[in-house]
Amino acid sequence: MKRFLIVIAALGWFSCENSESEIKALSDKNIQKDESIKVESFLSQGGVVKARLTAPVMLRVMAQRMVDTPYVEFPKKLHVDFYNEQKIVESG
């Protein structure tokens, strides 16, 4: 039984061989992107709409090789309408 365990352990020890490029490929961060089409987003404050954002494409990038901070990108175009607060006066 001891011999069997020693042979299995030796096979396991010597069978693991990876090249440096394989190890680096596994340790590199993957680029994770979320893509949204026909985006329409509203910004409100205190229940009042302050802005409306529209874009044909939005990319949210989670991680890159040299950048750890996630960011949002609008590669085609971006349009934002800002709204002023209007008071409604009731007559009567």
Image (cartoon, grey):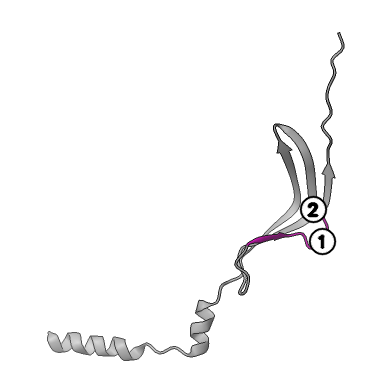
Residue found 78% across the figure and 63% down from its top: 75
Residue ID for mark 1 = 76
> Residue 17 versus residue 51: which sits nearer the camera?
51
Q: Are marks 1 and 2 in contact (CB under 8 Å)?
A: yes
Give left or right: position of 46 versus 28.
right
Q: Residue furthest right?
A: 91
In what element is the residue under mark 2? strand
Amino acid type, residue under disc 1 in the picture: Lys
Residue ID for mark 2 = 55
Give left or right: position of 46 versus 20.
right
Tell me residue 1's x, y (percent).
12, 84
Does 30 appear in magenta? Answer: no
Alpha carbon distance from label 1 to label 2: 8 Å
Circle 1 residues within 10 Å: few <14, some 14–19, many ≥20 = few
Tell which circle, 1 or 2, labels the residue nearer the N-terminal end.
2
Occupied quadrant, residue 45: top right
Residue found 83% across the figure and 25% down from its top: 87
In what element is the residue under mark 1? loop
Query: Which image quadrant: the C terminus?
Result: top right
Give left or right: position of 11 versus 45.
left
Give left or right: position of 58 versus 2.
right
Amino acid type, residue under disc 2 in the picture: Ala
Tell me residue 68's x, y (percent).
60, 67
**Where 50 sits versus 17, above or below?**
above
Q: Which residues are magenta?
A: 70-78
Tell me residue 77's x, y (percent).
83, 58
